[in-house]
Image (cartoon, helix red, strand yellow):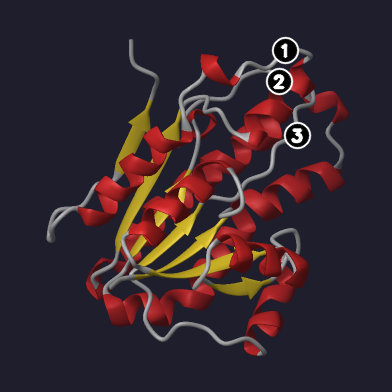
């Protein structure tokens, strides 16, 4: 039985992946923004354990985690949580930049740092759910794309630094996926949302499972997932 820590388990890709891992009996530690959200996740995923700390405040994580029980060994750390805000650069103030960067980049970096000892014990696997925006930047997507470009850099550096400890690191770049975040993007874009037009979260979740289950010493570095014909 493998042990996984998952952010963003409450919706979208993270929720679907959590369901798949729970079905096969893996031990799950789910990241929650606060204790109320932690209660919701434990009710939704019986047997799962939770870690409560808001991704918007990475500077508080080390102190918060010092008071919480953490797994001794971690086979998989899956960063699936994310935040999006679409604005032209002329309207992007520091607070908006900081909010997006904290959730999408700084908190994944800090969580990874804090959990590295447990990941090293298990020769674990870190998966960063990135985005097509991590490979290119479109108008109004500057803050989000910058955070995701940074997430790619984090993954690449981590892979090189931790190879000697046996860690595997994978970046996954989904195209537009039918998730609550995608619904929010459509509202920001002023467009009507139809989930049937987009890739289901299960397609991305199965891709992540494939990377996690790949026999060693093979390693998937980057995976782009797009809707098929």
Q: Is residue 115 above or below residue 66?
A: above
Q: In front of the other: label 3 or label 2? A: 2
How crowded pointer 2 is (Cα within 10 Å; few <14, some 14-19, many 20+) is rated as some
State how far apart marks 3 and 2 are (Cα). 11 Å
The quarter holding residue 36 reads bottom right
Q: Earlier in the sequence, mark 3 or mark 2?
A: 3
> Where does the image place residue 80, in percent across and percent down from the top left?
53, 50
State how far apart marks 3 and 1 are (Cα). 17 Å
Q: Secondary structure at mark 2?
A: helix
Residue 136 seen anywhere in this rendered image of the structure = yes
Task: Identify the residue at image location x=41%, y=82%.
Answer: 117
The quadrant of the rendering that contains the N terminus is bottom left
Q: Which residue is mark 2?
A: 186
Q: Which residue is mark 3?
A: 85
Q: Which residue is mark 1?
A: 192
Q: Earlier in the sequence, mark 2 or mark 1?
A: 2
| Closer-to-camera residue (8/57) | 8
């Amino acid at each position: 039985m493998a042990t996984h820590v998952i952010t963003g388990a409450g919706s979208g890709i993270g929720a679907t992946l959590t369901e798949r891992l729970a079905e096969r009996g893996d031990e799950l530690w789910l990241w929650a923004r606060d204790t109320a959200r932690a209660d919701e996740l434990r009710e939704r995923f019986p047997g799962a354990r939770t870690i409560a700390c808001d991704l918007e405040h990475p500077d508080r994580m080390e102190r918060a985690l010092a008071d919480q029980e953490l797994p001794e060994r971690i086979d998989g750390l899956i960063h699936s949580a994310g935040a999006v805000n679409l604005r032209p650069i002329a309207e992007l103030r520091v607070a908006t930049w900081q909010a997006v960067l904290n959730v999408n980049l700084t908190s994944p970096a800090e969580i990874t740092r804090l959990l590295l000892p447990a990941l090293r014990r298990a020769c674990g696997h870190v998966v960063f759910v990135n985005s097509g925006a991590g490979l290119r930047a479109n108008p109004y997507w500057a803050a989000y794309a910058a955070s995701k470009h940074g997430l790619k850099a984090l993954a690449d550096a981590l892979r090189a630094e931790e190879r000697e400890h046996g860690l595997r690191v994978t970046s996954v770049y989904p195209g537009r996926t039918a998730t609550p975040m995608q619904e929010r993007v459509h509202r920001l874009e002023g467009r009507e949302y139809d989930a049937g037009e987009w890739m289901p979260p299960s397609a991305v979740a199965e891709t992540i499972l494939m990377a996690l289950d790949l026999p060693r010493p093979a390693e998937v570095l980057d995976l782009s997932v797009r809707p098929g014909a």
